[in-house]
Amino acid sequence: MAETIIDVKNLEHTFNGVRAVRGISFTVREGEIFSFLGPNGAGKSTTINVLTTLLPLQKGTVRVADHNVAQEPEKVRRSIGIVFQDEVLDRDLTVWETMEFHGRLYAIPREERRRRIDEMLRVVELEDKRNERTKHLSGGMKRRLEIARGLMTAPRVLFLDEPTLGLDPQTRMRMWDYIRQVNEAGTTIFLTTHYMEEADMLSDRISIIDHGEVIASGTPERLKNALGEDVVYLETENDAEAREVLDRLESIRSITESPRGLSITIDEDGSHCLPVIMDRVRGAGIGIVSVNLKKPTMDDVFVHYTGRELRDTGRTS
Amino acid sequence: MAWEFLTIYWREMIRFTRFKALLFSSLLQPALWLAFFGVAMSSNFDRFASAVPAPPGVFPVEYLTFMAAGVIAMTTLFTSLFGGISLLFDKNWGLMREMLASPIPRTHIMIGVSLSGMTKSFIQVIIIMVFGLLIGVHFFPGYTPLQIAVSVLGILAFVGVFSLGFLLFSSIISMRMESPEGLQGVITLLTLPLFFVSNSLYPIQAFPPLLRALSIYNPLTYLITGIRYFTIGSDFFAIGARYTYTPVDILISFAVLVIFAAVMYVLAWQTFRRAVVT
């Protein structure tokens, strides 16, 4: 098993008497893409701010890249890269100056710095924009620049706070490619997002927090399967008969009949159950007209754990 | 030796030179003060002043030259008081987070911003002096080139320390304020008493006792003393008052400015150390 690179134990944080984070614990393993999900106001940003040393640690222990954030914040800062949720670009600096400034902040020696700037700009395909002021870049280019900047210091952990917010689908898919590339090159990714399919597609593991507490953790597959709500839609030549045949199957929770066929809710992984169902129905001599399997999405998982009510819309989480 | 503050300095100077219109106006404004206010006032004051002639043997100085030193000081004061505003913008636009989350020590952020503000003041001061000489300010009367060089260095030393003090002060307010409007309000409130309760435009000698007492606590008074000493001399007569400065007076003035800057540094350091920007 890979080593732990982020270790959070009983983290608590209070703002003006409001407990924004109420004793959360989780670990991130070196080399993985870890998603940290939760509704607005759940305590995500507070947690990230403590992890990235922007907020002082109040209670609990947090270790990032082998250093304690309370005792060695500078060493933590050297080991991490951050792409903030909202745009953090000086509008009046050029692309190259933005990178140069960042490299100097991290005291990367000149030669090395220039080399990395060239390399990173090539990776995010902004080479021909190097003398363009950042205010003239499109939303996607800005985001790519911020990712390039976050990566130029070769961090062990890259924090991506809503990296694809407000981007069009093409740019977003491109962004996923970059994130995967970066991760394959060895950087651990700590991701927050409100796009559940993004978390689903990218993450090795996910934690969902709400009301300042971690309420679910696991791989995307496990989280989805744990809902146990795979549904098979089955249309046959004789639905009533098919239903009788299937009623005896143990893994089926319930069957409802509708004019368009049967919808069958299954307790276990639907993809394993589906062939069994089809065999049974065919075995009974009933022809199948159509079949459809719907597995729960990360959206279903998210809503299952965090409920449907709207959260405080004024504050970002 | 840690040179990280140069990074912040570098960026501040890029910003300063990038906006040509802003750069131009910030350089032109003090020259305009001197050109209009200076020339208008001096044509009036010199008329009255002739009613009080200089005592025999004392070097008389016309008003334009007298107040030119005040304009240098005023420009330095205004530029420095607003110098910290870039920190407020950094904070409000989120750019501060990039710096605070990086390994650069926080003190270097404030030092870098302050040194860039000091550089801007230096540039302005040189421009005012050159422009002043062109429109008839009699700085450095009878000085040798070496004396002029020493005097200019002396002026820059005074201006440098003074501007650092006020830049740090401005940084403290910027770090504590939420909006540029708030900062503007505080600074406007401060500039008037600072500027007028000083010897920038007229002698302190004729002030009522309270204003006179206040002027002693005004760093601007000490800056102007230093500038007049280096630009005009140690014994001169202007708008009805005689000015004599001994080298000890000048050292004391400089020391006051150094103490002021040091106190501001400590306060700024405490503000930065505790600052939380998310």
Image: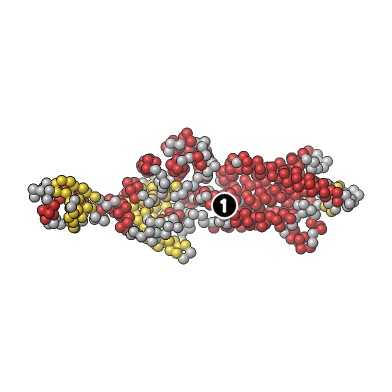
Report the colour scheme.
Answer: secondary structure
Residue at 37%, 40% (x, y): give it. Answer: A170
**Residue B102: % across, % down:** 50, 48
Question: Mark 1, chain letter?
Answer: B
Residue A129: in sight, yes or no? yes
Residue A147 rendering spot, x and y as whole percentages: 44, 43
User: Where does residue B90 sit, x and y in percent of width and height?
Assistant: 54, 49
Quarter of the image for residue A228 reads: bottom left
**Residue B126 falls left or right of residue A91:** right
Q: Nearer the viewer, residue A17 or B33?
A: B33
In the image, is B85 to the left or to the right of A47? right
Q: How many labels, in total?
A: 1
Instruction: Give whichever of A81, B26 is nearer the camera.
Output: B26
Residue at 76% x, 61% y: name it. Answer: B211
Residue bearing mark 1 = B88
**Is B79 in front, or is A57?**
B79
Left or right of B215? Residue A21 is left
Give the residue at x 67% y 50%.
Answer: B78
Residue at image point 36% right, 49% down: A195
Q: Is residue B213 left or right of residue A78?
A: right
Q: Quadrant of residue A38?
A: bottom left
In the displayed image of the protein, which residue is found farthest to the front?
A259
Packing grade of label 1 (10 A; few <14, some 14-19, many >=20) is many
Q: Secondary structure at mark 1?
A: helix
Q: Label 1 is placed on what type of residue? A: Leu
Furthest-top residue in this view: A128
Q: Is residue B150 visible?
A: no
What is the x, y in percent for residue A162? 41, 49
